[in-house]
Image (cartoon, rainbow, N blue to C red):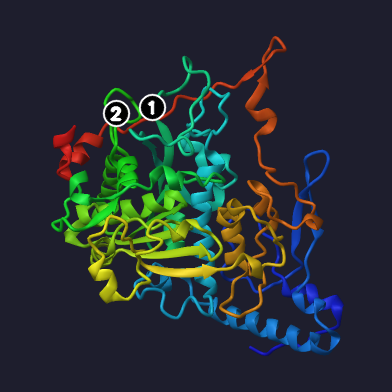
Amino acid sequence: MAIPCPKLPQSIPALIPHDRHRHSPPSLFSSSYKANPVRTLSAGGREKSKITRLPSAMRDDSATALSSILAELEVLNQEEGKRHYPLTERWREIQGVLDWAGLLDPMDPLLRAELIRYGEFAQACYDAFDYDPFSRYCGSCKYNRRKFFPSLGMAACGYEVTRYLYATSNITLPNFFTTSRAANKTWSQRANWIGYVAVASDVSAARLGRRDIVVAWRGTITRLEWVADLMDFLRPVADEGIPCPDESVKVESGFADLYTDKDPNCRFCKYSAREQVLTEVRKLVDHYTNAGEEVSISVTGHSLGSALAMLSAYDIAETGANVGAGGKRTATTVFSFSGPRVGNGRFKERFEGLGVKALRIVNVHDTVPKVPGIFINERMPESVRRLAEWLPWSYSHVGVELALDHKHSPFLKETSDPSCFHNLEAHLHLLDGYHGKGKRFVLASGRDPALVNKACDFLKDHHQVPPFWRQDENKGMIRAHDGRWMQAERQKMDDHPPDTHHHLRLLGLHKDN
């Protein structure tokens, strides 16, 4: 593709892609570029647009400005040349069948768009969760399952939620489990909503090239103390009922407890999170493969949710919940954001040996991906790691890592707050501007940088985006007919489908229920 002759500064904003709606996946085929508006909130609560960033070439000395413009145009033109390959032809590559070889540096534009899309599925868990301790629904999802995506402004995502996931824990997790202060009127004494399972609609399946099943796990937004809460010791996965033939395959015990604990006296947690996700995935795989469709399983999560994503994806493969009609294994992939290590070296080998793929997106300045296993991990020489494998603090990351650096973004300010480095929206912002190692940070889809400050204070002040700006109108309070203010009633919350026990039996897990 020919490189157009650049004009003087008036034409420079054309290097920055046009802004799109928050929850609509970026177009994979658009070739038009416009100035990048950043949405900020006016005094009346409405959004207003304002150009807040021009290409970095405008900040260069005049002697190098032209060459910088040409370089950025070259990058964008190269990316445009790749866009004509539709996802229907490349989805296996994007899902990691070749371990993303050649797709990360330089960054493949289709992969970037898909990573942001799956990251937004994980972000939806945060946006939908009720954190308010004064709400009697604290710890639940704020929205009805059938209206989940439309309630979040994500109606165009093309997926439907088929099941909510709940968890209980017999260990103390004050920084993850939230409960209402109205102890006698709360929706549940023991449960927390922890994620969901969704499936692509017919229209989306045609666009994606297969029927995609998404499992999204909730993590932690700002508090990082959960790392200390869960750091305990490695435990064989076989002790948790996972049918692994190798007793040396071990995972962090706190993650395993959260994944497998249940409470028979709680309507939401009478089945463990493990049983909930396995039965739903098995049901959907059976249904669509028996209909002759191609199916994929995409598991995503951020922070602690990433650990649950890794553990559940491994369990899906180990238990055979991804085996469809004719005994064919369904492609299973984890898109992990800022996740900790989950298990030992034998867990890594077993995970990858089962054909499960994992792409881990991390910020190099974030501490969470560096634990547990600070001293003994996959970075050690193989001979040394083998000798230390029996130690209870020997851990290994799985899959492929995509390392980002928030210091490369001109939108983000210097801060010592580690929760900013860990923030999921910040990771999605970094993905949007990443083109490869050593390449200039240029937003590819025009994803709104204001989203970074949704739950943190990370944007530079001159963008005029307030920190922690996302909140419900009037904090969920409504005015009753008599003029008094009160909490709105919510529709009846789903617990578990009536066929759960049937699918547990098919998986051989009914003995525990």
* Residue, disc 1: 190
The spot of residue 241 in percent (x, y) is 19, 45
Q: Dots 2 and 1: beta carbons under 8 Å?
A: yes
The spot of residue 451 in percent (x, y) is 66, 52
Secondary structure found at label 2? loop
Residue pictured at 27% horizontal, 62% vertical: 351
Q: Within the image, what quadrant is residue 354 found in? A: bottom left
* Residue, disc 2: 263
Disc 2 marks a residue whose amino acid type is Asp
Q: Within the image, what quadrant is residue 450 found in? A: bottom right
Position of the N terminus, as image quadrant, is bottom right
- Of residue 446 and residue 241, the one placed in the foreground of this image is 241
Please say if 144 is above or below 302: above
**Quick check: 18 left or right of 244?**
right
Cα–Cα span, label 2 and label 1? 8 Å
The spot of residue 86 in percent (x, y) is 48, 72
Residue pictured at 55% horizontal, 21% vertical: 489
Secondary structure found at label 1? loop
- Of residue 357 and residue 144, the one placed in the foreground of this image is 357
Please say if 163 is above or below 184: below
**Quick check: 135 left or right of 371?**
right
Residue pictured at 24% horizontal, 55% vertical: 250
| Residue 48 showing in the rendered view | yes
Label 2 vs 1, first from the N-terminus: 1
| Residue 201 showing in the rendered view | no
Q: Within the image, what quadrant is residue 370 found in? A: bottom left
**Quick check: 78 left or right of 370?**
right
Residue farthest toward the top in the current orientation of the protein? 482
Please say if 49 is above or below 504: below
Position of the C terminus, as image quadrant, is top left
Residue pictured at 46% horizontal, 63% vertical: 207
